[in-house]
Image: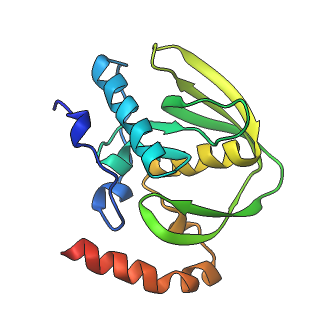
Amino acid sequence: MTVDPASLAILRYPHPMLLKTARPVEEVTSEVRSVAARMLELMREARGVGLAAPQVGLSWRLFVANSGQEGESDRVYVNPVLREPEGGLEAAEEGCLSLPEVLGDVWRPPIITIEATDLDGRRFTLRSGELLARVWQHECDHLDGRLIIHRFGQMAKLANRRILKELERAGKK
């Protein structure tokens, strides 16, 4: 299947693609590069810090990110793997471009290592903490069909109940 990057748009909950495990990208091709470029555009337009391929309807293990931290530039992560979490779980508020207006605390390790492939087909390894580590974990959750609402505690679920019901009603239309 050939993908037209111009046709890509951010899917909203409860779209079924958001709940599926993505498949590995077999090869970094010009199509993959074009899709990644479009995903970066969509992420910036939506004022996000990350966007995963399932969020634009593709079952690819790929995400783009830029947490906006000083010195960080846009980066593409193909077939990412998280490892070596460090520190006790810490709560921080997260939102999601596929769940507009939904916010809640998510517990994650503060430091993590990621291994992925870049758009030149080279494997790389990075280690980070704080916001960038959280972004990596959030986007990898998308690749596994997991959303922030699946990680919310009871209070966050209750606080977002009305918005989620509205999104579900809109998704049935």
Question: Does residue 106 lie above or below 1 as drawn?
Answer: below
Q: Which image quadrant: the N terminus?
A: top left
Nearest the camera: 29 or 21?
Answer: 29
The residue that appears at 56% across and 62% down in the rendered structure is 95
The residue that appears at 58% across and 66% down in the rendered structure is 151
Question: Does residue 101 lie above or below 40 as drawn?
Answer: below
- Where is residue 40 shown, x and y percent of the image? 44, 37
Picture quadrant of residue 68: top right
Question: Does residue 111 lie above or below 1 as drawn?
Answer: below
As drawn, the residue found furthest toward the right would be 87
- Where is residue 61 shown, x and y percent of the image? 42, 37
The residue that appears at 63% across and 76% down in the rendered structure is 153
- Where is residue 116 shown, x and y percent of the image? 55, 27
Left or right side of 170 for 107: right
Q: Which image quadrant: the C terminus?
A: bottom left
The residue that appears at 73% across and 35% down in the rendered structure is 70
Q: Which colour style is shown?
A: rainbow
- Where is residue 22 shown, x and y percent of the image? 37, 43
Picture quadrant of residue 13: bottom left
Left or right side of 155 for 15: left
Nearest the camera: 22 or 52?
Answer: 52
The total number of labels drawn is: 0
